[in-house]
Image (cartoon, rainbow, N blue to C red):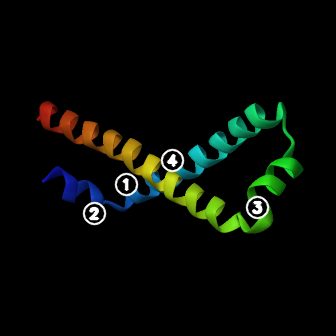
Amino acid sequence: MAFKRIVKDKAFWKSVAGMGIAFAIIYHFISMLFDYGGFEFSKFFEAKLGDGNWVQFTLGTILGSLVYGFIISYGQFSSRIKKEERDR
């Protein structure tokens, strides 16, 4: 099965982590721009991390990033496998 082959690959998980980190950074920058009209780091982090919201913010960021990274990386690895099989 392609799923098992992809999930067992260490390069896949590195790609998931890389895509996830990139997604989190870009998402939070864009969110900051829309919410505060610029790069207001102190206001952004005060709103997101203040009043005990840091756990929710951190878990949401990690979970969202991993899901995004998994979906995108799986698509890339799946298409690579299909291309390799066609070229045989």
The amino acid beneath tag 4 is: Met
Disc 4 to disc 2: CB gap under 8 Å: no
Callout 2 crowding tier (Cα within 10 Å): few <14, some 14–19, many ≥20: few
Disc 2 to disc 1: CB gap under 8 Å: yes
Q: Earlier in the sequence, mark 3 or mark 1?
A: 1
Which residue is nearer to you in this view: 12 or 71? 71
Q: Which mark is residue 19?
A: 4
Q: Earlier in the sequence, mark 1 or mark 4?
A: 1
Q: Residue at x 41, y 59 (%)?
A: 13
Alpha carbon separation for disc pair 2 and 1: 8 Å
Q: Earlier in the sequence, mark 3 or mark 4?
A: 4
Q: Residue at x 57, y 44 (%)?
A: 23
Looking at the rendered structure, the secondary structure element under dot 4 is: helix
Determine which residue is flagged by label 1.
Answer: 12
Determine which residue is flagged by label 2.
Answer: 8
Q: Earlier in the sequence, mark 2 or mark 3?
A: 2
Quadrant position of residue 72: top left
Which residue is nearer to you in this view: 81 or 74? 74
The amino acid beneath tag 2 is: Lys
Judge whether 78 appears above or below 14 on screen.
above
Quadrant position of residue 27: top right
Give percent across and percent down for residue 4: 20, 59
